[in-house]
Image (tube, helix red, strand yellow):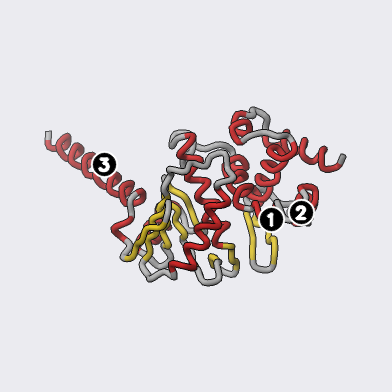
């Protein structure tokens, strides 16, 4: 009887502990000393933010996600600048420290140093445009919002090229719409940079910016399907063809 009671107590303690961790990950606002509201955003930090500068990049990112079929004008985002915070340490332990930013529920967590005056996120020797990082993670929030946590969560989600390709396609819109850019030029650059690489490799796209191979590949495949084959993101998610089949089709089009 004592053993049964002990096991029951341990089980209850574990459930309470895990519930506390989940609550902390999803609702970390109390861990941040500074916060303010701006349009569809609540911004949280442990330092004073240059609000005018940061808000400008929020506006740029929001303009990007408006082009997405997942856009919802009523959706609200919580933005966390987590570099150097206790929350970041918890996130590192539970979800890994490799990412420069991540999206959880409606939370956009920027894990690395934000320099809002010049609009960059520093990740080691690499740096990324702040509006790009924000827009990419916001699309992840909108994916979960539209399709649900069962279909989009860290343990269960569509293939990586579908998961990451669409946020890349939306957040890289300025590159895609540049007058000098074409999809065929984009594929040419990808093929040059990614020789003998796999999904787990990192591609150095410039002297101070890199991207995971599958992000780059997924963006090009999404771009091909949406801009050349006129598919929606719903269509892409429903497409039963394998990644290899779609990639090979894109390459045949590229070489035609």
Spot occupied by residue 194 in the image (x, y as percentages of width and height): 74, 53
Is residue 98 among the parts visible in the rendering?
no
Nearer to the camera, 111 or 222? 222
Q: Which numbered disc, 3 or 1, marks the residue closer to the eye? A: 1
Is residue 232 among the parts visible in the rendering?
yes
Q: Which residue is drawn at 72% across and 35% down?
A: 246
**Do labels 3 and 1 touch, CB within 8 Å?**
no
| Circle nearer the N terminus (1, 2) | 1
Q: Residue at x 75, y 52 (%)?
A: 190
Callout 2: helix, strand or loop? loop
| Circle nearer the N terminus (3, 1) | 3
* Residue under pointer 3: 15
Q: Distance between the residues labelled 3 and 2?
A: 53 Å
**Do labels 1 and 2 touch, CB within 8 Å?**
yes
Nearer to the camera, 75 or 140? 75
Point out which mark residue 181 bears.
2
Spot occupied by residue 58 in the image (x, y as percentages of width and height): 50, 58
Rendered image quadrant of residue 250: top right
Spot occupied by residue 72 in the image (x, y as percentages of width and height): 48, 41
Quarter of the image with the C terminus is top right
* Residue under pointer 1: 175
């Amino acid at each position: 009887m004592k053993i049964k009671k002990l096991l029951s107590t341990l089980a209850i303690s574990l459930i309470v502990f895990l519930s506390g961790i989940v609550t902390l990950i999803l609702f970390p606002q109390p861990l941040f000393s500074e916060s303010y509201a701006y349009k569809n955003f609540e911004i949280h930090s442990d330092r004073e933010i240059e609000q005018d500068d940061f808000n400008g990049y929020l506006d740029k990112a929001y303009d990007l996600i408006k082009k997405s079929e997942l856009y919802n004008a009523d959706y609200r985002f919580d933005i966390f600048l987590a570099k150097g915070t206790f929350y970041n340490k918890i996130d590192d332990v539970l979800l890994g420290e490799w990412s420069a930013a991540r999206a959880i529920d409606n939370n956009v967590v920027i894990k690395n140093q934000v320099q809002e005056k010049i609009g960059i996120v520093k990740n080691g020797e690499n740096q990324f445009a702040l509006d790009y990082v924000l827009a990419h993670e916001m699309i992840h929030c909108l994916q979960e919002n539209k399709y649900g946590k069962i279909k989009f969560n860290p343990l269960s989600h569509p293939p990586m090229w579908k998961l990451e390709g669409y946020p890349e396609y939306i957040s890289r819109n300025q590159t895609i719409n540049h007058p000098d850019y074409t999809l065929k030029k984009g594929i040419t650059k990808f093929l040059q940079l990614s020789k003998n690489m796999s999904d787990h490799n990192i591609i150095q796209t410039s002297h101070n910016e890199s991207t995971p191979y599958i992000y780059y590949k997924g963006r090009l495949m999404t771009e091909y399907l949406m801009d050349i084959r006129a598919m929606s993101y719903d269509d892409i998610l429903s497409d039963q063809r394998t990644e290899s089949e779609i990639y090979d089709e894109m390459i045949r089009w590229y070489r035609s």
